[in-house]
Image (cartoon, rainbow, N blue to C red):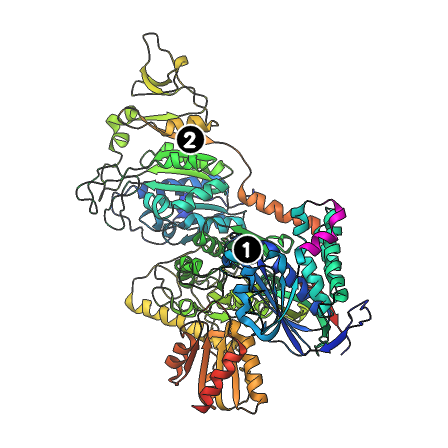
Amino acid sequence: MKMSVAPPGEPQRVKKVEERESVVIRFAGDSGDGMQLTGMQFSTESALAGNDIGTLPDFPAEIRAPAGTLAGVSAFQVNFASQEVFTPGDDVDVLVAMNPAALRANLGDLKSGGILIVNTEAFSEQNLQRAGYANSPLDDGSLDRYQVFPVDVTKLTVNALQDLGLSNREALRCKNFFALGMISWLYHRPIESTEHWIRVKFKKSADLVEANLRALHAGYNFGETTELFAVSYQVKPAPIAPGFYRNITGNNAAALGFVAASRKAGLPLFLGSYPITPASDILHELSSLKHFDVTTFQAEDEIAAAGATLGAAFGGALGITTTSGPGMNLKMETIGLGVMVELPMVIVNIQRAGPSTGMPTKTEQADLLQAMYGRHGESPVPVIAAMTPSDCFYAAFEAARLAILYMTPVILLTDGYLANGTEPWLVPRFADLPDFPVAFRTDPQGFFPYLRDERTLARPWVRPGTPGLEHRIGGLSKEHITGNVSYSPANHEQMIRIRARKVAGIAREIAPTPVGGAPQGDVLVIGWGGTYGAIAAAVKDLVARGKAVGHVHLRYLNPLPADLPDILSRFRKILVPELNLGQLVRVLRAEYLVDAVGMNKIQGRPFKVSELVTRVQRLIEA
Amino acid sequence: MSDSTAVKLSKKDFASDQEVRWCPGCGDYAVLNQVQRVLPELGVPRENFVFISGIGCSSRFPYYMNTYGFHSIHGRAPAIATGLKTARPELSVWVVTGDGDALSIGGNHLIHALRRNVDLKILLFNNRIYGLTKGQYSPTSESGKVTKSTPVGSPDYPFDPIAIALGAEASFAARSVDVDAKQLHDVLRRAYEHKGAAFVEILQNCNVFNDGAWAPLTEKATKADAQIVLEHGKPLVFGKDRDRGIRLSPRLEPEVVELGNGVSESDLVVYDERNPALAYLLSRLEPPQFPTPVGVFLAVSKPTYEQRVAEQIAAAREQLGEGDVDKLLRQGDTWAVR
């Protein structure tokens, strides 16, 4: 497939060029070394080179942990390939370590025989000590199983910039672009997008533009001229469907999904949020989209964020509140009120490793049962989950649509891995997304606050300010139809059953469940949320080896799809991999009385494809 | 909000069809009555009023008003009202809350709604007790108070709602008494007319769990000596015979003085409701040494939160044009595959 953007100006290579199908690179350094930026720029270069990509940023919760320590190591992993990419990759082919701590924290993931590029200048006695090395690993033979490329990145960068009159500190800050230039050469990446980025980013200082461009070019040219690298590698473009693409993170995609939904609904968007990692980027993104009739309210706390959102929904806005684990606990009472008063709102939980503060920047899937059952009283809420970074767009859109159509709070679960990870996204056309215009009730004739739509069981949505429809809602039990306060035992049960039926009825909205891999056979792997990529890659691999393994990935966790029992019955065994101690597996066992078994990992990191493949194989053989 | 063709409304237009269920003799009746009297005078269509409450006796208020209403969760009414008012600035949004609801569980939301100057009318019914849970002490209960949860007396110190509102940068703060119909009426009107967060503390009796909560202030015999009415531009005079006043010493300490014997009204503090420092000083006057001030402590004008939010949205639209979703989706790192 021909790419519109081919690597331009690719110089004639004099050294040997080898071809690779896929490569996983991890850039690792100190928090202040700019590794996230380096990784993101490399990802963009790779996307522009026509590869499919997947990325995994991995940064510490501390903003600037002491320099040179293990706590301060920040890393960014990117997987690029000439075929479809499902994950950021298991093991690493290339590790760029900017200091000893980065080496020590990441070496375990480097493949035997893998490429290790180290910034030798940073291997000072002090830095080695800070990283816990008694002797320099560069000298003691402990790195013999890797191809080690010692490069004095610091000195080479400073030399390249020496006549610019920058301070030493300013010059040192450019060394990540030297590293990026070097790796860009090694993998034949086009660097024009990075050059453009530098020009825009530093447009206020011509000196910094010049310095960073020089560092980038110096790194690129170093690759070409140094005798250190005998070989460079080419990864051909992947066969990607034609269309318009953009690189997008999950948080960004979710923000855009809500904007698109508000437009389709014809409502202003109100986001109530309190800053929390890893959810804040949705607040940041939406706060810059005011011209889309978006109001962002940075509340005094998580409770107020949810409360204001519900208040805005009462007023007729599309109400969204975003948070992560600890904030979710605080919002629960408001969600319960939303269930009782039956107003639409979307609560987004970007799950992170808990309990409590846990590991705020690391991923986990341990809030599913909380989303489903975490409120007092019988309080059913639809729960949906996003599967990939770009899927956050569609999941957000769907969450908003269901909330409005069924007049209910809806919980959207994503996670830190999806929120910060990126992938190429085939951008949809707005016109191709479903319309769901909102019709507020305005007719006083025959109006009752809890007189429901016969099909959806949704109650009418009335904007305050509508003459003749004045009414009161609230947390006390309400009488069927009239909505008056009621303590009648029979009425209480009736209303609870109606609300449960309303949420269960959402199953009618769910399209037939796609089954990946084998349609029937030995093992069905069922996942939800951010594990999609790893499971899809593992199942693809197993099927290619002739195994009868299928894959279902659930977008809807509550209610579950109506066709799920039928799919479950077509497989001998059911495996449920989750980044928790077994939550969906409990639901499936309880709902369907099936002997599903769990596969669980709670390390703040996603599954590796190889782990999944091994586990499924064991299950087949068992 | 209002227009000349609006239907003339009366008090009964604001009474809902629900039976009022406060205890007989509760101070809440008097407040409900007064609010239902004031609203028809404001020239606002009934459908544009919204009453939002939290939890507690006073928070049942919206059920008895034939307006839009939302009885929410404990302490959170200011947050919910902030969301509503921000989304719908044209509505007249009132918050009804109590001393426990607003100052204990919901203290954070109260101070931030005031700080932001959201145009809410916040009526805090202060009876210095938890009534709905049957008689525990509240954050405004006197220290040492014996209640169900403090059988040997409360070890807490109370705080003063007006002082808190002023500390939270409220642009309007006033105090009134449930049974003082005329004064309450005036304060409610002033609160409505103020553009911005209006905080009104209403001293209210709980005849079941804290009877006589404000007795000296409400008894005919003692009232005139126990309270001082703040009037903008007028000297601070009080007493049955209007023969006493508040003077500031050279060290800025307030003192009660008898008029006559060389002390005249010109020696007294002339009240200025635009002066937050003076308002705070007055909020610290407590019985028995001083009369309790009622009336408008502070009324200053500044742009409201929802106004500023709306202006930012309007400015963004003017600068960037009406948002185009397709354009938005196609921003960032993009490329085309043919």
Q: Which mark is residue B296?
A: 2
Q: Residue at x 42, y 28 (%)?
A: B279
- The part of the chain drawn in magenta is A155-166
Q: Quadrant of the N terminus of chain A?
A: bottom right
Please say whether residue A160 is one of the residues in the magenta stretch.
yes
Estimate the x, y position of residue A415 in percent, counting from the top left.
51, 66
Q: Are marks 1 and 2 in contact (CB under 8 Å)?
A: no
Pointer 1 residue: A125
Chain to which the residue tagged by mark 2 belongs: B
Residue A231 on the magenta span? no
Residue A438 visible in the displayed image: no
Choose between A512 and A137: the one closer to the eye.
A137
Counting from the top left corner in percent of width and height, residue B249 is at 37, 16
Q: How many neighbours does mark 2 have within 10 angstroms: few (below 14), some (14-19), or many (20 or more)?
A: many
The secondary structure type at the circle numbered 2 is strand
Question: Where, quadrant-wise, is the C terminus of chain A in this rendering?
Answer: bottom left
Q: CA distance from mark 1 to mark 2?
A: 70 Å
Amino acid carrying mark 2 in the image = Val
Name the amino acid type tagged 1. Glu
Q: Position of residue B222 (x, y in %)?
A: 25, 26
